Image (cartoon, rainbow, N blue to C red):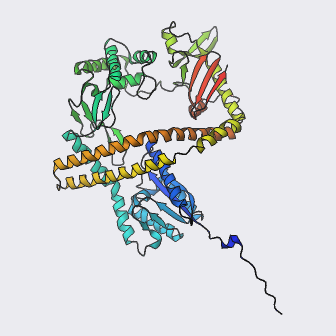
Amino acid sequence: MKVITKIDPSNAVLAKKKKRVAAYCRVSTGMDAQIVSLETQKSHYEDYINANPEWEFAGLYYDEGISGTKKESRPALLQMIADCEDGKVDYIVTKSLSRLARNTTDCLELVRKLLGLGIPIYFEKENLDTGSMESELLLSIMSSLAESESISISENSKWSVRHRFENGTFKIGYAPYGYSVKDGEFAILEEEAEWVRYIFSETLSGKSSAAIARNLNKKQVPTRRNGTWTASTIRGILRNEKYTGDCLFQKTYSDFQFKRHTNRGERDQFYMEDHHEAIISREDFEAVGQLIAQHAKEKNIKKADQKYQNKYPFTGKIFCGCCGSPFKRKVNYTGNLRYPSWVCREHIDHKEHCPMKAIREDDIERAFMTVINKLVFGRKEVLQVLLDSLRSETHKASLRRINDIDTQLEQNAERRKTLTSIMAKGYLEPALYTKECNELAVEADRLAAEKAPLVQEINGNMEKTDALGELLRFVNHCGMLTEFDGALVERFLDRMIVHSRNEITFCLKCGLEVKEEI
């Protein structure tokens, strides 16, 4: 007699395998705002993919600060294709055709290659799924439009900007020190303007830019970004025509490869007099310009000369705990002994104002090595715990709002592009075009103003997390330091504060502050 045994199916067999879905995105620049945009998109795609019970998030592939015109220049895209070939991805989601490729040939080649692997692509903006397409006609037409989109947007934007330069309606989004800006209109900030007048007055009296910067730091005059005053900052103010009430437009321009250059006559410039209220008279501004030019000629100084900048590992990173001034390196001689040291600039100029004495460079180097070695020894108890804490902080609400704002800004840009296109063809009255564009510009400014603090909040956390992750990877794979390595100073140290010859606080880029005794 035949015996038949029933075999019950296991849960593992019954469980339907989830589709592994990856997302691809790209931003056109590497600015902080765009880095946050990547984080926003990552959050969006994680929520979007995980919301489907039949999908499993397979990761986000992104290219940052890279043009979309050629696929060969995008490493993340190539990595995604390689992972598809290795069977790690079943389905791909991306925002639009222009995010994947702005070249028809590349777009079709990528789609065919991935379909050959059995992997469709879904384009959100176009609501296009390559897995359900019966022909490539629609894809070919839409990718052709995407191919010309970057050039079209660029040229329309340039035309729009030039038009606003010429008719005087261009709105500046950022005001220099001494001014505030609202809806493109400058207003004098008297608490800053008084120091602009002071800078011009001191220059005309014969003071150098470095001396003026030291005096401003000594007086604890705040900068726009809560940094320290430097000679280059002072020179930038002295050369800025906006303090006379005038405004020079198109100081820079972008070439056909979207690279930005200083305009040295390659493009038209537009000079608008009496654009806003002046802080400095034109006579004083011209006198300062002549004085700077004469000093540069006498000292044979060339603009943007970087010869003496960042010459030593600690340059620009050591500050006095007494007066806040930066330290300067000098070489000491005692008999036949020669050794470098660092000393407070204010102490050099006015010993009665700052009692901080010089500190030997080799003492600073040993203290820095000790800090790194302590972190190597206690990496799990200190760095890993701090990294876990930073990563646990979520910004879901902020990221969702940024995503909403980005969508509104894109819609705003689309409307402006359409207006510009109609205007360029002569179908729209200039007065109506200007009115509509100004309203859209005001809306874009409002959205950008709302987005800025959200971006800044997330950036601070992201930068610290990235810096801490890099430091942790380093200490996990290195042994105790036995000799000083200047490259580590640039890599991990933000600044150090000297409290005395026996005590220094090292402020690392990850936000960690370590006090070390010498």
Residue 77 seen by the camera: no
Q: In the image, is residue 117 above or below residue 264?
A: below
Residue 334 seen by the camera: yes
Residue 50 shown left or right of residue 230 in the figure: right
Q: Where residue 462 sits: x, y (%)?
A: 53, 41
Which residue corresponds to the image point at 69% horizontal and 37% vertical from the top-left? 379
Which residue corresponds to the image point at 47% horizontal and 24% vertical from the top-left? 308
Q: Nearer the viewer, residue 48 or 144?
A: 48
Q: Where residue 336 sits: x, y (%)?
A: 64, 10
Q: In the image, is residue 214 above or below residue 9?
A: above
> Which corner quadrant holds the N terminus?
bottom right
Residue 424 shown left or right of residue 82 in the figure: left
Which residue corresponds to the image point at 49% horizontal and 57% vertical from the top-left? 24
Q: Where residue 238 sits: x, y (%)?
A: 32, 23
- In this view, the residue farthest toward the bottom is 1
Q: Nearer the viewer, residue 159 or 433?
A: 433
Residue 229 shown left or right of residue 330 in the figure: left
Q: Where residue 245 sits: x, y (%)?
A: 24, 27
> Which corner quadrant holds the C terminus?
top right
